[in-house]
Amino acid sequence: MNPNSPIRRSPQRLRDRFKDETRAAILEAAEGVFASDGVLTARMEAVASKAGVAVGTLYNHFADRHALVDALMKVRQGELLGRLDESLEVHDGRPFVAQLDAFVASLQEHFTAHAGFVRVLMDSDGQNFGKKVLQPHEMIAQLRDRLELLVKRGVKSKDVRADDAELFAWFFFGAMRSMMARRVKGLATESLAEQRAALVRFLMQGAQYEPRGRR
């Protein structure tokens, strides 16, 4: 029988798909357990129970909790950067404010959908992950690179001042990080849309007072 025939290859693909689906379910469960129990105190047994798999199955995929945290970080980092890259590509050429709004919305959507990831990220300052995971300072650099691209577009369209433009990406990053920290800590009373509008307004106009009649 031809070893490359669909009949021979199909079972292997099914096994691989089942393995991938199991791995994804474990990561999803781990995110929830990390969010509720904390990264440092979460038990592998709790993750297995939430994922609906045996503890042995969990250890077949991840050697220990550190490996599980690393895997979760790698996947969520990739998803976030991919989402931001898509936003930059899809909205390229639109008015700068619309590009900025879409970029912030993408960040909000990802962090809202993955609250556990946000908690891991916020707890990771000063913590080193595995070699295949972007370290905190590397992740910050990746986000800043994308913001710098956005700023360059703003300068080109004359929506952002050219002088001091190299600092704006840092300002944008700091403002967005504070916005997400405020929501994760439960301090936000405004909606996501209201929060985003306030952030975009602040980034574009600063905190300068504007008489009510001129708004």
Image (spheres, grey):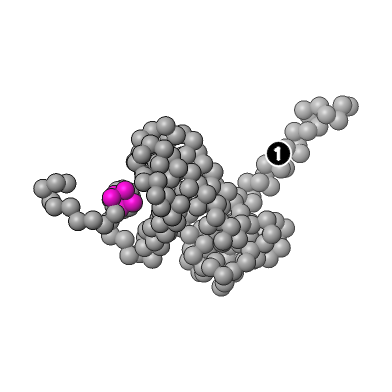
Q: Tell how many labels.
A: 1
**Whether residue 136 is situated above or below residue 3 in the rendered picture:** below
Residue toward you, 107 or 38: 107
Residue toward you, 161 or 76: 161
Q: Which residues are the magenta region?
A: 201-205
Quadrant containing the N terminus is top right
Amino acid on which disc 1 is placed: Leu
Residue drawn at x 54%, y 43% as measured from the top left: 82
- Asked if residue 122 can be seen in this view, the reply is yes
Residue drawn at x 14%, y 46% as measured from the top left: 214
Residue drawn at x 72%, y 58% as measured from the top left: 60
* Tag 1 residue: 14
The location of residue 43, given as percent across then percent down, is 59, 69
The secondary structure that most of the magenta stretch takes on is helix
The location of residue 62, given as percent across then percent down, is 69, 59
Residue drawn at x 63%, y 63% as measured from the top left: 129
Residue 7 placement, left or right of 124? right
The residue positioned farthest toward the right in the image shown: 1
Q: Does 107 lie within the magenta span?
A: no
